[in-house]
């Protein structure tokens, strides 16, 4: 191990150090994981912790915690991943971005995570604060690409590093092949696994993995799924991410958008079918974007279990 932060790890932290996502995926068992974000209010923290406790009995492979644009949730992200690691048996992955930070500042966060015994980090370039669609601008003395952050993490300690993948390509990439080459470069820099942006068609995921394998990269790619629980919200998120939302599903949802339970039922059914297709196609597992809620995710997970026996 190297890096200043690792020197500060106490004996108790060392005893509780968690498994890596790399090790957990290597078991060959389907991976199920859940994403959370640090809340801004006390009510939000209570809702989040309730969701974590409700999902905990499902024994997910890991959970991950996002890092706000421009590092705006830095302290809350570190606090939340530390609390999950200390108060639950869950393996936790911390997000880390390049935005609005120098290399020295990024090293400080890496040290904080290492000192807390966090071994798993999702390395992202990140979006610009205030406008996620704005063109990326590197910080003087900072990093330009997620690939650079992967290298920095690997140089800084014994971290298992994940990266983002885009089944429908990143919005700034000129085409699918170029975008896949960028993903392969992140893996060559040391990434151990990838998690995709949300998407709604299994064909896009399968095509991404095939392109990646043709480039000689065998890093596991976990598909990211967001169950629909709010029509306007999912359409807004789809627009920001560049994910094409199925027109037929959109029509069905708009017809019942004022009935939250009916929307949830359709959202759970659509997501469950997609998950089954992905697992049948060889996906190593499913990553759920929960929006800090547990009901829809638990319903999908429970529906999938008979098909995994």
Image (cartoon, rainbow, N blue to C red):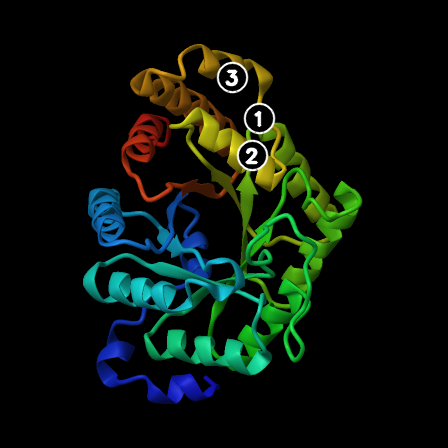
Coordinates of residue 234 in the picture (x, y in percent): 48, 31
Residue 65 position (above or below residue 283): below
Distance Cα–Cα, label 1 vs label 2: 7 Å
Percent from the top left, x then y, of residue 286?
44, 40
- Can you identify the residue that label 2 sits on? 238
Q: Are marks 1 and 2 in contact (CB under 8 Å)?
A: yes
Q: Name the residue: 73% across, 48% down.
A: 172
**Which of these two is toward me, 250 or 226?**
250
10 Å neighbourhood of mark 2: few (<14), some, or many (≥20)?
some
Tell me the quarter of the picture where residue 147 sits: bottom right
**269 relative position to 234: left or right:** left
Q: Which mark is residue 287?
A: none
Asked whether the beta carbons under mark 3 and mark 2 sit within 8 Å of each other, the answer is no
Which dot, 3 or 2, sits closer to the camera? Answer: 2
Task: Check whether the beta carbons of the residues at disc 1 and disc 3 lie within 8 A of each other.
Answer: yes
**Taking 234 as reference, is 147 left or right?**
right
Secondary structure at numbered mark 2: helix
What residue would you read off at disc 1?
A: 245
Q: Which residue is mark 3?
A: 249
Q: Residue at x 36, y 32 (%)?
A: 308
C-alpha separation, residue under disc 3 versus residue under disc 2:
13 Å
Residue extending farthest front:
130
Residue ID at (29%, 34%) = 298
Residue 104 showing in the rendered view: yes
Task: Name the secondary structure under disc 3.
Answer: helix
Q: Check disc 1 and report its element: helix, strand or loop.
A: loop
Residue 293 percent location from the top left of the image: 30, 39
Using the image, determine if residue 172 lies above or below residue 252. Answer: below
Disc 1 to disc 3, how far (Cα)? 8 Å
Q: Could you tell which of marks 1 and 2 lies nearer the N-terminus?
A: 2
Instruction: Count residues near mark 1 (Cα–Cα under 10 Å), then give few for <14, some for 14-19, many for 20+.
Output: some
Tell me if residue 237 comes above or below residue 69 in the rendering.
above
């Amino acid at each position: 191990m190297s890096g200043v932060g690792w020197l500060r790890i106490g004996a108790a932290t060392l005893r509780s150090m968690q498994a890596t996502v790399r090790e957990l995926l290597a078991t060959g068992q389907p991976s199920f994981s859940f994403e959370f974000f640090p809340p801004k209010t006390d009510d939000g923290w209570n809702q989040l912790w309730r969701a974590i406790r409700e999902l905990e009995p499902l024994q997910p492979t890991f959970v991950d915690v996002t890092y706000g644009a421009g590092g705006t949730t830095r302290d809350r992200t570190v606090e939340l991943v530390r609390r999950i690691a200390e108060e639950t048996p869950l393996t936790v992955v911390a997000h880390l971005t390049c935005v609005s930070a120098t290399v020295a500042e990024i090293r400080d966060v890496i040290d904080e995570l290492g000192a807390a015994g966090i071994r798993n980090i999702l390395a992202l370039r990140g979006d610009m604060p205030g406008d996620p669609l704005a063109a990326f601008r590197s910080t003087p003395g900072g990093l330009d690409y997620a690939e650079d952050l992967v290298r920095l993490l690997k140089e800084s300690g014994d971290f298992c590093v994940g990266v983002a993948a885009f089944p429908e390509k990143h919005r700034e990439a000129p085409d699918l092949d170029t975008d896949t080459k960028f993903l392969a470069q992140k893996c060559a820099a040391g990434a151990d696994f990838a998690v995709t942006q949300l998407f709604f068609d299994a064909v896009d995921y399968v095509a991404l993995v095939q392109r990646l394998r043709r480039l000689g990269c065998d890093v596991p790619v976990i598909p990211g799924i967001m169950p629909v629980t709010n029509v306007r919200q999912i359409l807004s998120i789809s627009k920001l991410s560049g994910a094409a939302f199925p027109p037929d599903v959109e029509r069905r949802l708009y017809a019942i958008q004022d009935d939250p339970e009916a929307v949830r039922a359709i959202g759970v059914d659509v997501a469950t079918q997609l998950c089954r297709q992905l697992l049948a196609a060889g996906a190593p597992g499913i990553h759920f974007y929960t929006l800090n809620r547990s009901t829809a995710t638990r319903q999908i997970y429970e529906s999938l279990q008979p098909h995994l026996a």
